Amino acid sequence: MRKPIEYLVSVILFVGIGIAFVMADGLSDFDLAEHRISDVSFEFGDAILSGTLVLPMNIKSPPIALIVHGDGAQDRFSNGGYLALINTLVDAGIGVFSWDKAGVGASSGNWLDQTMDDRADEALAAMQAISARDNINVDQIGFLGFSQAGWVLPRVANRTAPAFTVIVGAAVSWRDQGTHYNRIRMTLAGAAEPEIEQRLAERLRQNDAIFGSSAASASIADMAPARFRFVAGAYWEDSTEIISGMKGPVLAIWGEEDLNVDARSDSQIFRTQLMPLTDNRQILVVPNATHGLLRANLFNYQLSSEWPRFLQYTFLGMGRNAYAPQSLKQITRWILTTKK
């Protein structure tokens, strides 16, 4: 009969080995070595934009999702954050092309000089570049965008008919989204409701004045001039009217616990503007999911830069399992069954 200490050691070793296997499986989601990978560059204006095309090994002409980033200076893999998502898509038979924003990574130019119209034109230039490659069918190319892509992809899908358009965590009004974001931030900081409403109303008055027609010559002390110009150019963005003109299949999806955009309000606007909803025009709100569709009980922060260190390791160990259950399967299944 085993002594209690020997039994305890055995249990600890067994659990440790199990955790190691789980983490190894999660870490494999950040390795693209099992797929066909090639670097692709394309011109847009005066810039050369560089990215990576990832294709399944044994599919000759797969559907391809072009990734359109959210806000910020994002490289092609969003500092590694996209890799588990990309592996999930490619494992399902969907190719992915993602590129460094202008002025980030290997791309020239400056993304802060772009308007949402510019970003839409850039996405179309990426589509043209990928469609020109061998064994690529332009009718199989679609888009997968995040957050700020809510002002980009409706424009794209008004100008062309993509094979599919998936938008995750889209905001509709820049001005309203900023108010919602700050309301959540103040609430999380413990401010009382009357104080929150007073501060939000004052901030909105100030922002409306600052980002008005004379915004180009204005400034904000805690905002870099280039960032100020970018925000000034986007402050009055509202995609409500152009959503209804989107061509091709559309999936708009939000996390129910989104701390960045008002998922309830914005999903309803998309629902109304995309009517009638069909199998290839769908609105989904995922339970227990964040702005980026991660598990809200673990990863619900407004910015991933706010994650504590242990949570960064948790994300690496979980890989695609860090996403809310079924959320990625819903996206891949929808792309494969509704593409043109």
Image: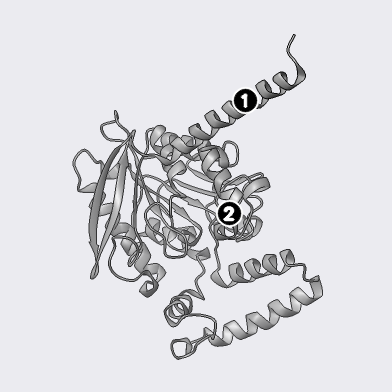
> Callout 2: helix, strand or loop?
loop
- Which disc is residue 291 wearing? 2
Q: Where is residue 220 in the image (x, y as percent from the top left)?
A: 53, 85
Under mark 2, the amino acid is His
- Which disc is residue 13 wearing? 1
Q: Residues within 10 Å of mark 1 (few under 14, many from 20)?
A: few
Q: Which of 172 and 92 is in front in this view?
A: 92
Q: Where is residue 154 in the image (x, y as percent from the top left)?
A: 44, 59
Examine the image and state in which quarter residue 208 appears: bottom right
Q: Quadrant of the N terminus?
A: top right
Q: Nearer the viewer, residue 82 or 203?
A: 82
Q: Distance between the residues labelled 1 and 2?
A: 37 Å
User: Residue placed farthest to the top in the image?
Assistant: 1
Examine the image and state in which quarter residue 112 appears: bottom left
At 57% from the left and 47% from the top, the residue drawn is 293
Q: Where is residue 226 in the image (x, y as percent from the top left)?
A: 42, 79
Q: Where is residue 253 in the image (x, y as percent from the top left)?
A: 55, 49
